[in-house]
Image: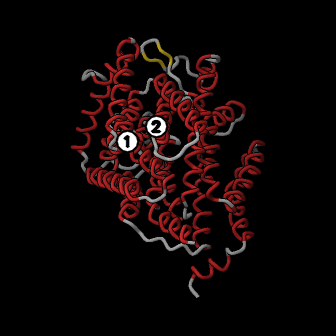
Amino acid sequence: MTYLNILQNLIHKKRAIFAISISIAVLVSLPITIFAKWNICFVGLIALLGIALYFSLKPKNGVILYLLVIAPIYPTLRNIILKVSDIPGPVLSIWQDMGIYLLIIASLLRGAKNDIDIKFQKLDIIVLSIFLLSVYGAVVSQDIFLSIYGFRLTYLPICFYFIVRLLHYNYIDVQKFTTFLINTSFLIAIIGMVLYFIFPNIYFIMTEETIAPEYYSIKRMYSIFWSPVVFGSLMALNTVMTFTLINSENKTTSLRKTMLRLQFFIFCFCLALSMSRGSWLFAVTGIFTCTILKKSSVKFLFTVILILLVMFCFFSFRPFYGALKSAISTKGARYQWAFETIENIKRAPFGVGLGKAGHVAARFAKTEKHENIKTSSTDSWYLKIALETGIWSLGLFLMFMLAAFFFSYKAYLYTKIPKLKAIYLGIMGAFIGFSAQGIGSNVWDFYMVAPIFWVLLGFVGSYKSMEKDYALYNNH
């Protein structure tokens, strides 16, 4: 009997899954609680045990719970805990990461229990290769502290792709996640509008900043993320997704379409007030891509006119015009940082190591014990990955982009599941837009947004198995 057979026999009982998850939660949380004597950890321990149980029994719902319920409130919850207790930030980060690890374990156990036969595809191999870049980057870095932070930020979210592949999602699960994503983002947008217009000073209370994030006298919208860039990217993603659902050929009730149109309008409004120029590019590129691929000349013309009108309003309104002008100015800081990063890449073509470029480098640049940190690569994903793990890793990522586009386009073109056609088109358009935003932002390091994209790409990677299940179901 192989180890896999033993594991399968063991986990046919849900109590075994529960016991394993609880053991892991206790092993991690109990020492922190006992030795640090933080009362709030007891509450966190109980919460983590409950989450472990739920993830073990319903891992698919666990993905929704973690990404679309816990993740949105975590930044606010973290700020509150740091204000009322003496718990260091890294401890809270460990608790946050535990959710992902529990999901990974639950997915592995569920996959073994159901004896799912997953055939590796080209996209799986490329994504796995990108994940393994973390090992290479850690070796080059020779700094375990920065490597851990770099892994958490960039490579740990990739696990969501494999979680989706292991859990054998069907088209109903995809619809459920997409609907939950749009509705949750809509709620986040409404909260953002309330904070922006009714409680404008709460930003200073939550972040302890003395200056509001502004562009040319216009305060930026950030919602409960306290980051206008992350908030803008989430709004751009949902703008593209709702656009494809509104224009889908599926028979949708008038009430549903009216709600989608309302959500689309709110997402566009919040996207504009985020003043995130990369997110603007994300949304415009994504909508153009979806319109062109749908091959609808009338809708394409309408989209072009609509986007031109919106751009005209931006250019007419001085703050928007100033923000756009600063983004393309060759005298701006981004251009200087880009040229500096290119020079650093020339000096270290095989990379400076994990955590020594991008946002992690910028965060710990003032710490004396960390050497060879390059802080200029905080505003371009492609330059950041080339500097961090070498030029060859940039080539690998570009290969991944081509493979992801090919798979998403193939899924959209050949799917026989009507309700998934618009979703696949939205994923493809959003991926192209997200990739365009990556020219000026480290998008694959963005909180919450990057993990959501890995889930969406996991749906694309699983489209063949979904088609088989759908065909079998209809034949019966």
In the image, residue 18 lies at what x, y percent?
72, 65
The image quadrant of residue 11 is bottom right
Residue type indicated by callout 1: Cys
Pick the front one: 303 or 338: 303
Residue 378 visible within the image: no
Q: Earlier in the sequence, mark 2 or mark 1?
A: 2
Q: Residues within 10 Å of mark 1 (few under 14, many from 20)?
A: many
The image quadrant of residue 258 is top right
Q: Is residue 11 left or right of residue 362?
A: right
Say if mark 2 contacts mark 1, CB within 8 Å.
yes
Residue type indicated by callout 2: Phe
Pick the front one: 141 or 422: 422
Q: Residues within 10 Å of mark 2 (few under 14, many from 20)?
A: many
Q: Secondary structure at mark 2?
A: helix
Q: Label 1 belongs to which residue? A: 290
The image quadrant where one finds the N terminus is bottom right
In the image, residue 174 lies at what x, y percent?
54, 54
- What is the number of the mark on residue 14? none
Pick the front one: 360 or 296: 296
In the image, residue 49 lies at what x, y percent?
73, 55
In the image, residue 139 lies at what x, y percent?
38, 57
Classify 458 as above or below 266. Answer: below
Please name the residue shown 50% across and 17% down the image: 219
- What is the number of the mark on residue 243? 2
Residue 273 visible within the image: yes
- Cα–Cα gap, marks 2 and 1: 9 Å
The image quadrant where one finds the C terminus is bottom right
Please name the residue shown 34% across and 21% down the image: 324
Classify 471 as above or below 223. Answer: below
